């Protein structure tokens, strides 16, 4: 898939390309190989751990790479600060990275594994600032939680899940949230869910709200 994405982006030698969701730098590395020797890759990610991993992976391309910890919604400001007024392509690979989902302390993992069950309800991509999933789950009104799960998660049991969350406050761990989702959904719904992803909608909605 990364090869197809880069093929359609079509970077050429000398291009300036923005990767707004740098992650571990997989796509960025492929882009860099194609824009050398004079091209510039601006890599943005709000996650400090992603920035560290990408810097390591792309260390052979230092001259051609600008790595910035930030949100791609600030792309205009970031490019102005770099004195770049025009780019040849922008890549956004939306979602969470494997690193984020496989690091239990981050609270992104929704499979009921023993490590995930104990994880704090954080879900921030930038762990240095902002509200956590626990802040939302423990303080929002029931009707606002319902709307969040419905609008951003497309979750048809939004209302009953929100009711169970409010009843169980305070929620502290991923396990607490999974219990609330279980109590708010019929067993048949969970059994039908492909790859045991019955909690994915609620997690997606929370992730989007927490990370703007
Ligand atoms: C699916 S991963 C990207 C993987 C990357 N393409 C690679 O090849 O390794 C998505 C990344 O986007 C970042 N991200 C998500 N929303 C963001 C935003 N609004 N601004 C900056 N980074 C964001 C996440 O922190 C995560 O590292």
Image (spheres, helix red, strand yellow):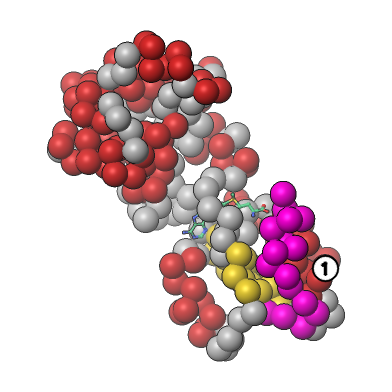
Query: At 31% from the left edge and 18% from the top edge, which residue is drawn?
Result: 185
Please give the range of residues in magenta: 1-16
Q: Is residue 179 visible?
A: no
Q: Which residue is mark 1?
A: 33
- The residue lying toward the viewer, choosing from 132 and 211, is 211
Query: At 21% from the left edge and 29% from the top edge, which residue is drawn?
Result: 159
Query: At 68% from the left edge and 67% from the top edge, which residue is drawn?
Result: 9
Query: At 22% from the left edge and 23% from the top edge, which residue is drawn?
Result: 160
Q: Is residue 144 above or below residue 7?
A: above
Q: Is residue 133 above or below residue 62?
A: above
Residue 212 in which image quadrant: bottom left
Badge 1 marks a residue whose secondary structure is helix
Q: Is residue 124 left or right of residue 184?
A: right
- The residue lying toward the viewer, choosing from 198 and 208, is 198
Residue 73 position within the rendered picture, expressed as x and y whole percent measured from the top left: 44, 67
Residue 202 position within the rendered picture, expressed as x and y whole percent measured from the top left: 36, 34
**Label 1 CB, ligand 1: below 8 Å?**
no
**Ligand 1 image-quadrant field:** bottom right
Residue 199 in which image quadrant: top left
* Other residues around mark 1 within 10 Å, as few (<14) / some (14–19) / many (≥20): some
């Amino acid at each position: 898939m990364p090869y197809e994405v880069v093929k359609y982006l079509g970077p050429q030698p000398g291009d300036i390309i923005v990767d707004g969701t740098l992650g571990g730098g997989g796509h960025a590395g492929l882009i860099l190989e194609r824009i050398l020797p004079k091209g510039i890759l601006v890599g943005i990610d709000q996650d400090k751990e992603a920035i560290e991993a990408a810097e390591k992976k792309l260390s052979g391309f230092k001259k051609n790479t600008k790595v910035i910890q930030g949100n791609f919604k600030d792309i205009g400001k970031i490019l102005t600060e770099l004195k770049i007024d025009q780019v040849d392509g922008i890549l956004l690979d939306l979602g969470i990275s494997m690193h984020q989902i496989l690091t239990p302390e981050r609270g992104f993992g929704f499979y009921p594994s023993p490590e995930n069950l104990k994880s704090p309800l954080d879900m921030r991509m930038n762990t240095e600032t902002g509200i956590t999933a626990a802040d939302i789950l423990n303080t929002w009104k029931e009707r606002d939680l319902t709307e969040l799960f419905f609008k951003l998660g497309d979750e048809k049991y939004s209302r009953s899940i929100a009711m169970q969350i409010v009843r169980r406050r305070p929620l502290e761990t991923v396990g607490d949230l999974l219990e609330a989702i279980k109590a708010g959904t019929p067993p048949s719904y969970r059994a039908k869910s492909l790859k045991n992803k019955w909690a994915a909608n609620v997690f997606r909605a929370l992730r989007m709200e927490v990370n703007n």
